[in-house]
Image: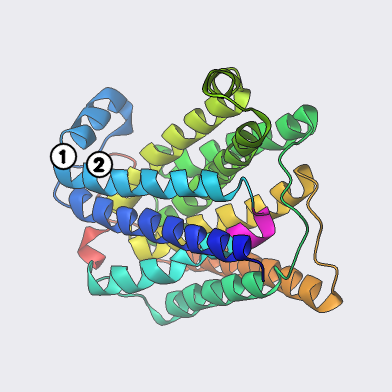
Amino acid sequence: MIASSYTGIALALLSATSYNVGLIQEKRALGRMPALDLRRVPRVIASLLADPAWLAGFALMLLGLACQIVVLTFEPVSVVQPVLASGVALVLVLSRLVLRERLGAVEFWCVAAMAVSVILLAASAGAGGGAGHHANPGWMAAVAIPSAIIGLLVGASPLRHRSRALSAGVRYGIGTGLLYGVAALAIKGLSGILVGHHGDVRLVTGIVSSPYLYVLAGCSVAAMLLYQVALQSCRASIVVPVSNVTGSMYFIIAGTWLFHEHLPASPAELGLRLAAIVVAGFVLVTLSRRAAEEPGPGPAAVPGLLADQGRQ
């Protein structure tokens, strides 16, 4: 493995660690806040920005995103994303040690299967092709726009209807995962500007004039707000893995195709890649069925939301 690959993997690990430790810090801060109501977005944002503990977690997440943008300028999606997805394991450890969350038997095995899918995904990376930086704008729009709309509809569904605890967590996870997946595609698109433009003025002009910047901002803000409600009302050990695996699978499948990166040449590595996707899909289906079988919700503290703090 060449030196740049070692650097890329190290930077991706830093990104994953910073981002997921930031999530846990946000979860701790949200546990001390009044219930968030996305019908009053300005008030929600003001509450978040006024809390130093939440801001510390948010700063760690921003550091993780910055590292992700940099590493995507010189490493392909198929190498970077499996490393980023490994943050699922860190979240599970921290949610148990720091947040004192516990999983039922079925949920535990589903989350363990998610970790297996991440390992299979990493094993399938192989040498891979070079990092692509440019996608066809028409195909990008055709993929990103419907994905973002579906993500918003699924992620916001627990706000419109009182949901079971596990069901809400799964829906939040899938919805925010799709939104963050689209944001990751935009980050990948922005990485092409970093490579293709030289000089501070041209670089800034290229970034500001790029639609990728505004796709990234819009999807990130929508996902972040939904994520805050999800972290406050549901278990991080459910929301974060579902969101991460959904976003990772989406990014690898869509990003590899849109940015013309090669699939694994080895049949064994391609088989591992497909197995990882099948396992992740099976887990999401199992969790969704498990959510449907869960007893109905009791009185909710916030209209349209189910506070899950009592189960943590």
Q: Quadrant of residue 127?
A: bottom right
Q: Which residue is mark 2?
A: 302
On the image, the x and y values in percent for residue 15 come to 44, 55
Q: Quadrant of residue 264?
A: bottom right
Q: Which mark is residue 105?
A: none
Q: Residue at x 45, y 66 (%)?
A: 88
On the image, the x and y values in percent for residue 293 come to 47, 67
Tell me the distance, in whole angstroms, between the alpha carbons under discs 2 and 1: 21 Å
Decide which of 35, 225 is in the foreground and name it: 225
Is 48 one of the magenta-colored residues?
no
Q: Which residue is mark 1?
A: 51
Q: Residue at x 42, y 50 (%)?
A: 64
Q: Residue at x 66, y 31 (%)?
A: 145
Location of residue 56 with respect to 84 vertically, above or below? above
What secondary structure is marked by label 2?
loop
Can residue 162 be seen at all in this image of the molecule?
Answer: no
What secondary structure is marked by label 1?
loop
Neighbor class of circle 1 (other Cα within 10 Å; few <14, some 14-19, many 20+) is: some
On the image, the x and y values in percent for residue 146 come to 67, 35
| Quadrant housing the N terminus | bottom right
**Region in magenta:** 75-80
Q: Give the amino acid type for the residue marked by disc 1 in the picture.
A: Asp
* Tally of numbered discs: 2
Q: Quadrant of residue 284?
A: bottom right
| Quadrant housing the C terminus | bottom left
Decide which of 260, 49 is in the foreground and name it: 260
